[in-house]
Amino acid sequence: MRYHSINGDIVADEDAHLYLGDIGFRRGYAAFDYLRVVAGRPLFLEDHLDRFERSCRLLELTLPLSREGLKVHLRQLIERNELGDAGVQLYLTGGVAADGFTPADPTLAIYVGPIRWLSPELYRSGAKLITHRYRRDLPEAKTTNYLMAVSQAGRIRREGAVDALYHDDGLVLETTRSNVFVVGEGGALATPGEGILKGVTRTNLLRALAGEVPVEERDVTMVELRAAREVFITGTTKGALPITAIDDQAVGDGGVGATTQRVMTLFEEWVARYLEAAGVI
């Protein structure tokens, strides 16, 4: 049996319910975050809580627990579920609004579930992206607004891709759930720096690459993307994933490049060092 949390109460799976009048459901108004638990330890916890708190502030929602209180509660939930490896989803909704629209007392919900991993073959041979012109509302916040992402799911599946890459006004932005990195003709590594959600994996990858592989955070054009020698994406359930095709065009020579391979190794080492040093929450 799995256990979740509603407003600080740990409840069994069948008892985890939200009130129908909550505008997280009625209007899709809620902050969201997703983190991995590895061998009972939350990966990059402080970074995830930083982002979750920032998203809540951008939505003008107030968390009912302090940072320390939330960490204690997460530890209790992890212990109650006897978690080894799993995914934990944090939600702060707009609450039950008397007029069905205006945020009221927020609802804090925490959902525990399994992680669905990509095939290991994709890390050896690379994956495909499709492109879609779109810029998310309030991109600096991670919210439950996945309307465009879910609407693209059928096309992603039909075209044999792993994700859809958003772009607008000639600029590369992000995928539906990941950040994007490109390696140009001169070997320089770049990633979009504005108008995106800066992912926790992206943040830690930049730390892992510091002093090893120079990275520019700047506007990246679609022209650059099409001419890139290598492309990879980053995310909580992906790590660093090589991309070897975009739409119907191969990236570079169609194989996983040397820079991407080095990045993957450096990030795996970074994660291993983090977990080795991590104690309880």
Image (cartoon, rainbow, N blue to C red):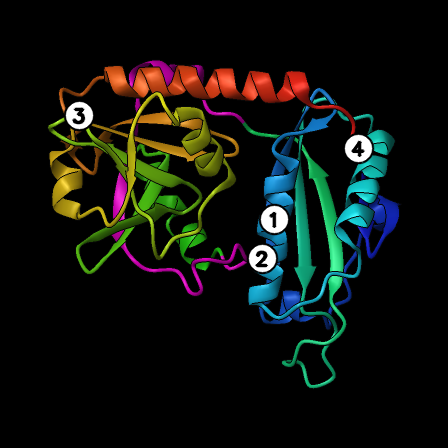
Front: mark 4 or 1: 1
Residue at numbered disc 4 = 78
The amino acid at mark 1 is Asp
Residue at numbered disc 3 = 187
Q: Quadrant of residue 47?
A: top right
Q: Position of residue 162 (x, y in %)?
A: 37, 34
Q: Is residue 13 at all visible to an observer of this figure?
A: no
Asked if the residue under mark 4 is in contact with the one under mark 3, i.e. CB atoms within 8 Å, the reply is no
The amino acid at mark 4 is Ile
State which region is magenta: 117-145
Residue drawn at (69%, 35%) of the image: 113
Question: What is the secondary structure assignment of the residue under circle 1?
Answer: helix
Of callouts 3 and 4, the N-terminal one: 4
Of callouts 2 and 4, the N-terminal one: 2
The alpha-carbon separation of the residues under discs 4 and 1 comes to 20 Å
Of callouts 3 and 1, the N-terminal one: 1
Q: Is residue 213 at all visible to an observer of this figure?
A: yes
The amino acid at mark 2 is Arg
- Specify the quadrant that holds the N terminus: top right
Front: mark 2 or 4: 2
Side of 73 where 273 appears, left or right: left
Q: Position of residue 276 (x, y in %)?
A: 65, 16
Residue at numbered disc 2 = 54
Side of 14 where 175 appears, left or right: left
Q: Is residue 150 magenta?
A: no
